[in-house]
């Protein structure tokens, strides 16, 4: 845990020049693109990004291709793949292919925004805990331990029970609120090792405020580590949202892959319509695989010695 | 072992506090949520008279502070209320479902951890060879498979298409009603129903345990005592199985504890898709039926189990690794 993540020596830690970040980026990119697993991950991600972008096209061609409201006037039931509907239609005749594309957009949106928020929370709380020490540290870390062992999906289910239908942004926010502790723990231990380094001491002697020390001197040093967790958090957010939608507690106004699976399952088409059952599941599994592979590759790029302690989700 | 006892005591106190915080948060969420908290605890189908009796019995007419004490007290004395959906005390439902969950879940976790350790050990030994690459990528794929989907695929393929295994439930009623069937056929019947849910959970867990074992094994192989063992001229198999792998398996045990929350999400999804009569399925259904007493109790019970299991894992770790001292 005390691993120093910068495998090139950071210039005195404080306010890193832009050139440092640039060289760090090109170097990481170089290693990443040579890493087999990282490369597979990036190619997959690229494909899904294209899908997400393409999701805007079908509804423009013809309103019957609208993933949510598009109903084909001649087909009002589920039908197999055809020229008109590449992957067939769902139980009320909506186009499965355009739903699949829309699902890619939702998955990216949910995954990246939830991951970003949980990284933000985790970094802020971890830095605060590590920097403040004493009871503040104890309190925050006990809280982290407690949240860490809570099964997020079930927590969200209970929230859905109490507050009724959750909309997609509430779901994102809740995922972020329950998925920061892993990041916070790592950032805290990194902050602890930084706290007594000479450059922090000298900043303090020079009269820098706590806030300035945290933001200007500690943050740049823990940020790479925090970003490393980004990929894994994206994976977990996508899975949780999909599972929640699958169980029927997703946002009814969005077409997510989990929602598509819920429709197949609930309308009893599971046995008759493999063209409908297969694509959403393949997409969820492959997109999470892509982010997970990217995360693992980045981990090795940033620090080959670092072992993940957080195997989950 | 005095210090271990003190460690356990400290952890127990911590767990107690954590559980209390969860209980309190849930109570306040319950009262903060829009809608009438009384209506949430009382079955809407009851007569006015029964309703008044139940409200008085559960103390729902008391001030909030007293209600809170009552709520905590009720929980610890096993008074969880009456399920709306089943019209049965929640405690009875839980007592009925809990063993099923424990059976499926612990079997899956233990089997997948053992398999992960075994295969992880082998591929780490052959690092960089085609077998290693193939198994590592396979494990990554297994680990990120979307569980409900893989469960549905299993049902579709093995249950429907090929008809090898039953697709829902835990027992075939005809065997259990028949007075002539002995415990052996009943046991086999449960096993038969357990194959698909078990396989689903196994697939999804096994990958992550394998990956952890593999990287831990690779790290262990760089240790000095492995060089010593080699220098002594010990057979490779002995070094792998008796020197390296026992130490390398320790992180897998930690990860079983750390990933428990994740596994329980998966357990609930599996139970739901396969209609396995366990706590997880009960929680999901209770939420759909707005059966608050049952939903809250299932959740609290799962939380308590996760907290306790983490302690068990830590203590086990201390026993298995003599270097750990508290």
Image (cartoon, coloured by chain):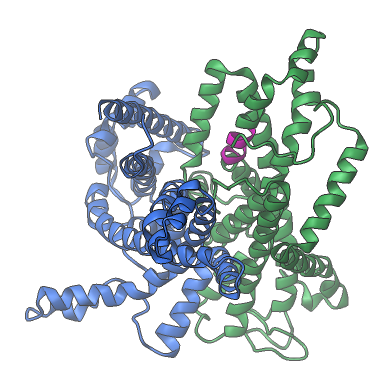
How far across and down, in percent of the image, does residue B19 sit? 38, 33
Q: Chain B is drawn in which colour?
A: blue
Taking the spot 32% from the left edge, 43% from the top edge, the residue there is B316
The quarter of the image holding the C terminus of chain B is top left
Taking the spot 75% from the left edge, 70% from the top edge, the residue there is A101
How far across and down, in percent of the image, does residue B203 sit? 46, 69
Taking the spot 71% from the left edge, 72% from the top edge, the residue there is A99
Judging by colour alone, the chain drawn in green in this rendered image is: A
The reply to whether residue A266 is in sight is no
Q: Which of B129 and A237 is in front in this view?
A: B129
Give the left or right position of residue A220, taking residue A262 as reference: right
Q: In which quarter of the image is residue A288?
A: bottom right
Q: Nearer the viewer, residue A209 or B302?
A: A209
The magenta-colored residue range is: A180-187
The reply to whether residue B325 is in sight is yes
Q: Nearer the viewer, residue B178 or B65?
A: B178
Q: On screen, B237 above or below A193? A: below
How far across and down, in percent of the image, does residue A182 sit? 57, 40
Dominant SS of magenta comes to helix
């Amino acid at each position: 845990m005390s691993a120093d993540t910068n495998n090139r020596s950071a210039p005195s830690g404080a306010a890193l020049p832009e050139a440092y970040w640039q060289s760090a980026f090109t170097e990481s990119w170089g290693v990443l693109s040579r890493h087999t697993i990282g490369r597979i991950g990036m190619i997959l991600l690229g494909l899904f990004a294209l899908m997400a972008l393409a999701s805007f096209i079908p509804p423009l061609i013809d309103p019957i291709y609208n993933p949510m409201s598009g109903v084909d006037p001649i087909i009002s039931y589920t039908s197999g793949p055809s020229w008109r509907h590449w992957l067939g239609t769902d139980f009320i005749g909506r186009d499965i292919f355009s739903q699949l594309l829309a699902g890619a957009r939702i998955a990216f949106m949910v995954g990246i925004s939830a991951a970003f928020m949980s990284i933000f929370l985790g970094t802020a709380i971890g830095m605060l805990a590590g920097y403040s020490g004493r009871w503040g540290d104890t309190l925050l870390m006990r809280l982290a331990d407690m949240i860490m062992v809570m099964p997020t999906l079930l927590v969200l289910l209970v929230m859905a029970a109490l507050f009724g239908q959750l909309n997609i942004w509430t779901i994102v926010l809740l995922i972020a609120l329950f998925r920061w502790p892993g990041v916070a723990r790592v950032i805290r231990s990194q902050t602890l090792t930084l706290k007594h380094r000479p450059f922090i001491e000298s900043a303090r002697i020079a009269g820098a405020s706590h806030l300035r020390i945290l933001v200007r001197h500690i943050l740049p040093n823990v940020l790479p580590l925090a970003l490393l967790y980004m990929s894994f958090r994206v994976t977990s957010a996508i899975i949780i949202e999909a599972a929640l939608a699958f169980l029927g507690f997703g946002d009814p106004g969005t077409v997510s892959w989990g929602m598509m699976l819920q429709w197949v399952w609930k309308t009893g088409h599971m046995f008759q319509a493999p063209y409908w059952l297969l694509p959403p599941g393949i997409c969820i599994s492959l997109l999470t695989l892509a982010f997970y592979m990217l995360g693992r590759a980045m981990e090795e790029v940033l620090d080959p010695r670092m072992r993940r302690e957080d195997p989950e989700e | 072992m005095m210090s271990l006892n003190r460690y356990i005591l400290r952890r127990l106190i911590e767990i107690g506090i954590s559980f209390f915080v969860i209980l309190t948060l849930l109570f306040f969420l319950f009262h903060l949520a829009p809608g009438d908290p009384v209506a949430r605890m009382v079955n809407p189908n009851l007569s006015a008279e029964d309703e008044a009796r139940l409200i008085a019995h559960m103390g729902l007419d008391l001030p909030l502070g007293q209600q809170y004490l009552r709520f905590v007290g009720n929980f610890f004395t096993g008074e969880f209320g009456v399920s709306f959906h089943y019209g049965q005390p929640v405690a009875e439902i839980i007592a009925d479902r809990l063993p099923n969950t424990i059976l499926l879940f612990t079997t899956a976790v233990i089997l997948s951890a053992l398999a992960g350790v075994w295969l992880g050990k082998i591929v780490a030994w052959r690092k960089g060879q085609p077998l290693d690459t193939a198994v590592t990528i396979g494990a990554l794929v297994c680990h990120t498979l979307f569980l409900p989907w893989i469960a549905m695929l299993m049902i579709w393929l093995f249950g429907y298409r090929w008809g090898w295994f039953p697709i829902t439930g835990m027992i075939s009623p005809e065997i259990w009603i028949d007075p002539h069937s002995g415990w052996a056929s009943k046991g086999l019947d449960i096993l038969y129903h357990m194959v698909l849910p078990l396989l689903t959970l196994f697939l999804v867990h096994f990958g992550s345990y394998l990956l952890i074992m593999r990287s831990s094994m690779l790290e262990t192989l760089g240790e000095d005592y492995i060089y010593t063992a080699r220098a002594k001229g010990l057979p490779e198999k002995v070094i792998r199985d008796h020197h390296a792998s026992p130490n390398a398996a320790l992180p897998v045990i930690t990860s079983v504890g750390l990933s428990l929350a994740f596994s329980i999400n998966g357990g609930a999804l599996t139970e739901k898709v396969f209609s396995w009569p366990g706590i997880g399925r009960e929680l999901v259904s209770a939420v759909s039926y707005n059966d608050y007493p049952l939903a809250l109790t299932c959740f609290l019970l799962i939380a308590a189990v996760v907290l306790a299991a983490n302690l068990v894992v830590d203590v086990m770790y201390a026993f298995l690794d003599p270097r750990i001292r508290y």
